[in-house]
Every structure is written in C-alpha cells, then in structure tokens.
Image (cartoon, rainbow, N blue to C red):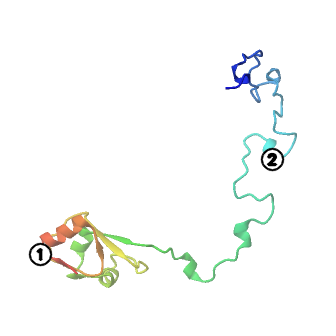
Amino acid sequence: MSLLSKLTKITDKSKQRIGRGYGSGKGGHTSTRGMKGYKSRQGSKVPLWFEGGQLPLIKRLPMLRGKGRLNVVRPTAEVTLTDLQNMKADSITLDSLKLEKVIDVRFKKAKIIASGELTRKITVQGVLISKAAREAVEKNGGSIA
C-alpha cells in the first residue's frame, strides 16, 4: 500500500447537488442544462430514434410491395385437446386442422397441448404433440404416427 492511501482527509467539502438552488454551487435557472434548446426545457426527452431532424432511418428504407408484408410469420400453432374433441375428422394432420379452420392457413407447424379433455379415438400424423397430450390420446385408444 502506498503512503497516499493512508493520509487523512483535510477537507470536509461535500458533493455538489445539481439544481438545488443558487447556494448549492451548481444551481440557478439552467443548472448544467445550457442556455437554450430542446434539452434545456422541463420534461424534454429526446427519443432514441431521433436523428437531429435528419430523415429517419425507418423513412429512408424502401417499403415492401404487396399485401404479403402484412402477413405475420407465425412459427407454431397451439392446438388444444378440446379443439381435437370438436373436430369431425378422426385423422389429425396439419391439412385437416387447416381444413376445419382450427388453425390459420399461414401456419407451417402445429403442436397439440394438453388443455381440456379428449374422449374419442383419434390418429395424429405429422403434428407435434406434448407429453401429457400424447398420454391423453393413447389413453383413449388413439395412435401417434
């Protein structure tokens, strides 16, 4: 250890508190904000995307053409056991789920989750299935391919 760290303090000057009046040393009507401008005003916050009046990046980029830009890519649809109970088809595939409008046609995958009850025999093909839902299907004599 050096000698400097062992020396005792000889000043009792406290930290300056900004914006607490003229007597604080850093007070007054501006108190480190500068004289004029947007950030000197009360309650002003510059948004993260603000580029100083320049045309923003989001407006500089080209728009995507067509109605396809409005379609949100959904990764996996959730299908409950209650949905399967209400279906007419005995063979559950991705196409049969889309055909009976259980899921949207834009979904590329579907997963069966154990929510609700299943009381009939079904066959599941090409659809992901949770462990508890698999047990519910097999309990009713169904099969998973």
Camera-nearest residue between 67 and 25: 25
| Three-letter code for the amino acid on which mark 1 is drawn | Gly
For residue 46, which numbered disc appears in the image? none
Q: Position of residue 145 (x, y in %)?
A: 22, 81
Q: Is residue 8 left or right of residue 88?
A: right
Other residues around mark 1 within 10 Å, as few (<14) / some (14–19) / many (≥20): few
Q: Are marks 1 and 2 in contact (CB under 8 Å)?
A: no
Classify residue 141 as left or right of residue 106. Answer: left
Front-lying residue, 145 or 35? 145
* Picture quadrant where residue 3 is located: top right
Residue for badge 1: 141
**Total label count?**
2
Q: Mark 2 — residue?
A: 38
Residue at (32% x, 81% y) in the render:
94
Question: In what element is the residue under mark 2?
Answer: helix
> Can you say which quadrant of the picture contains the N terminus?
top right
Binning the other alpha carbons within 10 Å of mark 2 as few (below 14), some (14 to 19) or many (20 upward) gives: few
Q: What is the distance, in whole Å, between disc 1 and disc 2 at their CAs?
A: 71 Å
Residue 55, position in %: x, y? 78, 66
- Label 1 or label 2, whichever comes before in sequence order: 2
Q: Amino acid at mark 2?
A: Tyr
Q: State the residue at coordinates (32%, 72%).
A: 111
